[in-house]
Image: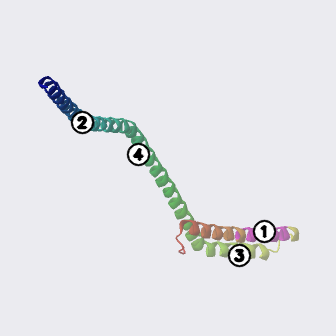
Amino acid sequence: MLYIQRVYRAWVVRQELQERRYAAEDIQALFRGYAQRKRYGIAQKRVVVLQRYGRGWLARRWFRPALREYRRQLGAVARVQALWRGKMIRHEARIRESEWLMARLAPAAAAAAQRRRKQSKDRPDTPPGVRKAREMVERQVRAEETASSFFLRCHCIVLKTKTGSGQQP
């Protein structure tokens, strides 16, 4: 009986040791898995940081020349706009100056033309055919003056509308 008890007790102890060993292995495996996941997470975070710096460097390396080119083109656009605006202002100033001159000189020019017409009509030695030709030319000149002043007024109105000034010169 002692032999059977001894064998049985030895078997029970071996079973308990084996269960403890399995439990220890399970605990160790869990801890090793936890530690490995923690190391992997730290390494992954470091890799992500390195990738972020690398990608940022590459993006800046590509972006700087593109930004320089964009700024250069933007400066060129601003220069073209400034040149165009200057041209339009000078053009408008010339139109206003010509309008002012026409307003100042038109009465004198009309009076001079009337004097010339009167003088040519008053001459008794002018042949009738020449007189008739002069009158026809004078009518045509008056029609052209009227048409050109009408065109100039329309042109000024269009310019005022385009520039948005809306003020009379």
Crowd tier of the residue under label 3, counting other residues whose Cα lies within 10 Å: few below 14, some 14–19, many 20 or above: few
N-term-proximal mark, 4 vs 3 = 4
Amino acid identity at mark 2: Leu
Which residue carries the number 3 mark?
A: 114
Amino acid identity at mark 4: Arg
For the C terminus, the quadrant is bottom right
Image coords of residue 24 (percent x, y)? 19, 33
Does the residue at mark 2 contact the one at mark 1 (Cβ under 8 Å)?
A: no
* Numbered badge on residue 30: 2
How far apart are the alpha carbons under marks 2 and 3?
118 Å
Amino acid identity at mark 1: Gln
How far apart are the alpha carbons under marks 3 and 1?
14 Å
- Choose mark 3 or mark 1, whichever is in front: 1
**In magenta segment, residue 139:** yes
N-term-proximal mark, 4 vs 1 = 4
N-term-proximal mark, 3 vs 1 = 3
* Numbered badge on residue 71: 4
Figure coloring? rainbow
Please state the extent of the stretch shown in magenta in the rendering: 130-145
Helix, strand or loop status at disc 2 = helix
Residue at left offset 14%, top offset 23%: 3
- Choose mark 2 or mark 3, whichever is in front: 2
N-term-proximal mark, 2 vs 3 = 2
Which residue carries the number 1 mark?
A: 140
Of 66 and 121, the residue lying toward us = 66
Amino acid identity at mark 3: Gln
Residue at left offset 77%, top offset 70%: 138
